[in-house]
Amino acid sequence: MVFRIIAGVLLMVASAAHAALKPVYGCSYWDKKTDNVEQLKKCMEVKEGKLFFLPELFTKSRDVEGTLWVGVYEYARDAGLQDGDYYVHAPDSYLSVIHFDNGPDWYVEGLVRSRQNGKIGFWDYAFRNRIAPQFDYAGQFKEGKALVCNGCKTQRDGEHVALVGGEWFYIDKTGKRVSEVKSAPF
């Protein structure tokens, strides 16, 4: 009987200790010494449903104008996090950006695309939202305009994906519609 009580207490203590541990997740990052993409096993935690990037990332990663790139892929799926790319300023300051051409979307004309709640919008270098996420598709800016679509859908053809249907138009850097597109370009 005493053995069962001791075993039960030990099991409860071990369970409580395990629950108190915060899981730490890995990521990919751009290493400042090797100038290559590397993996960091202890990169971030999830605190109250938000990411928190650990100090080691900031000592190893190369930044561009005060912003780090972090790739969160299979490392954090068990925490319910989506695969994706993030720009990071500080342990609790980050922006999820669109994965584009084998890496994170880049800033074009001072703005970067991010998908929030299924819609695409644009943010600046300080992670301030400049054009609310409202588009099903949005291209990068070129000469002050970006091609966007509402209502378009992806259509898979083998390994390729096309966008079909929807209403296509151009916006300016304030998000205002500036011209129509007569037929979908994709």
Image (cartoon, helix red, strand yellow):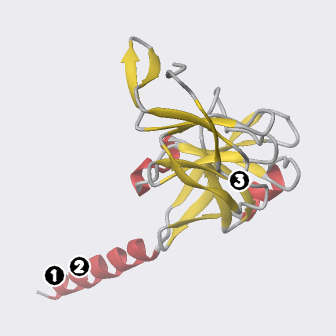
Query: Which residue is disc 2 drawn over?
Result: 7
Q: How far apart are marks 1 and 3 (CA)?
A: 68 Å
Mark 3, residue position: 174
Residue type, label 2: Ala
Few, some or many residues within 10 Å of mark 1 (<14, 14–19, 20+)? few
User: Which residue of the protein is positioned furthest toward the left in this rendering?
Assistant: 1
The alpha-carbon separation of the residues under discs 2 and 1 comes to 5 Å
Q: Distance between the residues labelled 2 and 3?
A: 65 Å
Q: In which quarter of the image is residue 29?
A: top right
CB atoms of marks 1 and 3 within 8 Å: no
Q: Nearer the viewer, residue 165 or 155?
A: 165
CB atoms of marks 2 and 1 within 8 Å: yes
User: If the image is split into quadrants, where does the N terminus sit?
Assistant: bottom left
Name the foreground residue: 42 vs 78: 78
In the image: residue 10, left or right of residue 174? left
> Residue 149 appears at what percent x and percent y?
51, 36
Mark 2 or 3, nearer chain start: 2
Q: Is residue 21 visible?
A: yes
Please, what secondary structure does the residue beneath circle 2 have?
Answer: helix
Residue 22 percent location from the top left of the image: 50, 69
